[in-house]
Image (cartoon, helix red, strand yellow):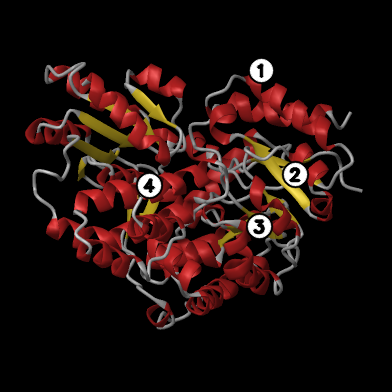
Amino acid sequence: MKESLLAIQKAVDELDIDGITALVQACLAEGLTPLEIIQDGISQGLATVGAKFETGEYFLADLVMAGEVVNEAMPLLKARMDPSEAGQKGKVVLATVQGDIHEIGKNIVGMLLSANGFEVVDLGVDVPAEKIVQTARSTGAKLIGLSVLLSTMVGNIRQVMDGIDRAGFKGRIKVAIGGACTSEQLRAEMGADAYGETAVQAVRIFDELRQGA
Amino acid sequence: MSPFPIIAPLASSTGIRLTGTSMRANIENAATQLASIQAYLARFPRVDLVFPIMDTSVEARAVGCPYEFKDTVPVITTHAFADAAAVETIPIPDPHANACMRVNIDVIQGISATGRTVGAFCLGPVTLAAHLMGITALVRVAMKAPEGCARILAHCTHIIRPYAQALLAAGARTLIILEPQVNAFSPRIYEKSIQAALEDLASTLPDPVLHMCGDTNPHLPSFSRTRYFTGLSLAAKVDFRAALDACPALKEKTLIGNIDPVAVMLNGSPELVREKVAALLDGMRGENFILSSGCDLVPDTPLANVEMLIDTAMRYRL
């Protein structure tokens, strides 16, 4: 592994928001492609961050900060990226369900998915079920991620599942849920396809879903 | 000597259902909220300590942050202050002249006038800063610019303190300082960038309680070292008995809580409520402890579950 890519991994892992841009520029100057920098540098750094979160070494604020580090680097990389390389794993529609405005977890999921080859269509917060389903249809996305924090809003997951069913896409558009009040039991009750206990599980979950979508 | 246990669920919002009113009407109108709380107390007269309906947007709305009512709660929709310099321009509201703060002062006054022991809520500086700046901007400052963070939290404390003191003057026996955003930060950042601001606020208040949401197990040693707070109100993810055994310094604080407001109180059966309350009380005999819910109960919480919590607790007094 090139030293420059290890430096990128370290910068992401250590939340070095001040140093990341220069390191990315150095990698580009060496002739590394944006995709290589993302896959072997940034993504690996995020995997370490995710592992530290799972073990309790890192907290939500550290994940947010890691997202900020990646956000510093991505414009530089996207400007140099071949359009065909971006989002090669397919599109994911992300939304916090209607009536709920919490977005930190969703934003971290979006950042992780973007850095790992997915094209993210982030609809934001308080999004009606119809809009989520319609966006999936119009963009061709086969994957939807729903975030719910408020227990009073979990019924909106069912609204999305029913909307997918009415549109004739049952089984062809896969839905993952996450958020403080969600659970595997809730996933089963709502008929969703996957449940993520933490945002860092998102890449694995959506990788598995896209293989079946 | 206080009875065991002191019964203080955060359950006033169930009065909203009893009066058939809306959350919005209760948040915006003191008379409506007082009627709801009176209905709650008429239904559950055996609680020892009563609280108003929890609203974590008061201080932010009081300084003009735009908000909307999303379903049942007011939500700050715009985080307009980008940095310390911007936050420091915010004028300190006079709580008695400010409509948002006045509602809660009047509610506390109204409950206190009935002779009931009342507690009040105010936001802590971290969560207020998150409302003003957005959580991402606050994270950047807390983790990378500690001097700027200190200035932001100091000004937020300046905003909160007069309101807190007005609530006490209105008759609140205790103040619970709400900090649901604190557990987003590591204990290291808490001690480096947050603890001093919380102590600054608490140092001027009598017997304040610090309320945190989520899994704060990693933070408990830090909380035990946070000065001036006499109580810690913690969410259901903390096992109180295990926490006291692992961190004996916590015994200096009164632990308050922590029956799960959703999994147990909202979605559980009365039998589950009894089981959880009994287990908690069995573990906390002889400790500084107040029985409560881990957070505010939602209005739709089954009344039978609230009754079971109180009934189970009363059996321990026999």
Q: Which of pointers 2 and 3 indicates the residue nearer the eye?
A: 3
Residue B61 in view in this figure: no
Identify the residue position indicated by label 4 in the image.
Answer: A44
Identify the residue position indicated by label 2 in the image.
Answer: B48
Q: In the rendered structure, which amino acid carries the disc numbered 3?
A: Leu
Q: Which of pointers 1 and 2 indicates the residue nearer the eye?
A: 1
Circle 4 residues within 10 Å: few <14, some 14–19, many ≥20: many
* Disc marking residue B210: 3
Tell me how far mark 4 sits from mark 2, CA to CA. 54 Å
Tell me how far mark 1 sits from mark 3, CA to CA. 30 Å
> Horizontal placement of A119 versus B140: left or right?
left
Q: Chain of mark 3?
A: B
The quadrant in which the C terminus of chain B is found is top right
Residue at image position (60%, 51%) is B212
Q: Is residue B7 above or below residue A58?
A: above
Secondary structure, mark 3, is: strand
Question: Splitting the image into 4 quarters, where does residue A209 fall?
Answer: top left
Circle 2 residues within 10 Å: few <14, some 14–19, many ≥20: some
Q: Which of pointers 1 and 3 indicates the residue nearer the eye?
A: 3
Q: Chain of mark 1?
A: B
Q: In the rendered structure, which amino acid carries the disc numbered 4?
A: Gln
Identify the residue position indicated by label 1 in the image.
Answer: B271
Q: In the rendered structure, which amino acid carries the disc numbered 2?
A: Asp
Q: Is residue B66 above or below residue A157?
A: below
Secondary structure, mark 2, is: loop
